[in-house]
Amino acid sequence: MLVDLHTHTTASDGTLTPQQLLAAATTAGIDVLSITDHDSVAAYSQLPAATGLELVTGIEVSALWAGRSVHVVGLNVDVHALEDVVRRQTLARERRAERIVERLARRGLDVDLAGIRERAAGAAIGRPHIAAELVAQGIVRDVRTAFRKHLGPGKAGDIKTEWPDLDTAVGWLRAANGTAVIAHPLRYRLTRTALARLAADFRAAGGQAVELVSGHAAEHEVAKIADLAAGFGFRVSVGSDFHAPLAWRSLGVDSARLRRLKPVWDGW
Ligand code: AMP
Ligand code: MN
Ligand code: MN
Ligand code: MN
């Protein structure tokens, strides 16, 4: 069985529409899919009634923990119960985009907010939309460079203060009957101790699971998270963090890799 519980569409910073993503997932042989757009559930109102695969509702919420931005995936959530959350996060993203544009302007980079909004095309604005606009205006060569010089960690566009704290984000997901999952735990570049502290705080907040496999995880990384999951009694999830077909090597993860761990989809 192929499971992918972390993907993005045009409702956030993905390049495929929800319909196109479904078609691609079907072609890839995915049996269980969740669309987990950044701070949005808009994809779920753009899908056909019959999907041909098992669709699990989801979202990826941006949060703050110990001064860092961390992502919490919510699975099997009641999307209607998240309406206020999505409204709040969309506003936070809007304000953040304005602040990023101001900061860039102060550094002499005149990037057009209207252009960014157009690029987002109604989706909650993310840094990838700003990066694309920087490229379109010829300010940087490509999206990678945009992140490296202007939007990535420690750069002018790295504004995290608008996000709710971890407890709040987990609380939102639990209140919507969802399973809260730490997204891509190794991407925060935490020390072993700090990662354990994140896991402890997450569990104390009501968090239940961790992504065992995210994108193109190496075997030793999977083993590391398996230990973390076992140590904290977390269930495990798997997801590709799919954004665009070109960067897509493997949508879906074979659930045989889960071995002795308890997957999130076993009895939601
Ligand atoms: P945001 O949600 O606005 O904080 O933007 C974060 C998103 O930007 C991530 O979900 C990725 O899709 C994308 N991203 C982060 N770092 C990079 C990078 N170095 N190059 C390209 N995209 C990135
Ligand atoms: Mn993204
Ligand atoms: Mn993420
Ligand atoms: Mn993601």
Image: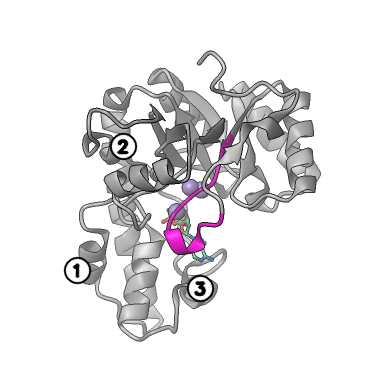
Note whether 83 is above or below 162 in the view shown.
Answer: above
Which of 250/228 is in front? 250
Res 83 → quadrant: top left
- SS of the residue under disc 2: loop
* Residue drawn 79% across the image and 32% down it: 227
Indicate whether residue 240 is drawn in magenta.
Answer: yes
Q: Disc 1, ligand 1: is the CB inside 8 Å? A: no
Residue 169 in magenta? no
> What residue sits 44% from the left and 55% below the top?
243
Q: Which residues are magenta?
A: 238-249
Q: Where is mark 1, residue-wise? A: 114
Q: Is residue 35 above or below residue 267?
A: below
User: Please, what is the three-letter code of the amino acid marked with disc 1?
Assistant: Ala
60 vs 46, nearest the viewer: 46
The image position of residue 102, as x and y in percent, is 32, 70
Question: In the figure, 139 relative to 68: above or below?
Answer: below
Q: Where residue 257 sits in the image (x, y, percent)?
A: 70, 34
Nearer the N terminus, badge 2 or badge 1?
2
Q: CA distance from mark 2 to mark 1?
A: 23 Å
Q: Closer to the N terminus: mark 3 or mark 1?
A: 1
Callout 1 crowding tier (Cα within 10 Å): few <14, some 14–19, many ≥20: few
Q: CA distance from mark 3 to mark 2?
A: 27 Å
Going 40% across and 63% down the picture, which residue do you hit?
A: 128
Tell me the crowding category of disc 3: few under 14, some 14 to 19, or many 20 or more residues within 10 angstroms, Cα based: some
Q: Is residue 68 above or below residue 53?
A: below
Mark 2 residue type: Val
Q: Which mark is residue 41?
A: 2
Residue bearing the label numbered 3: 144
Q: Is residue 218 left or right of residue 5?
A: right
- 162 vs 55, nearest the viewer: 55
Residue 252: mark in rendering: none
Say which quadrant the N terminus sits in: top right
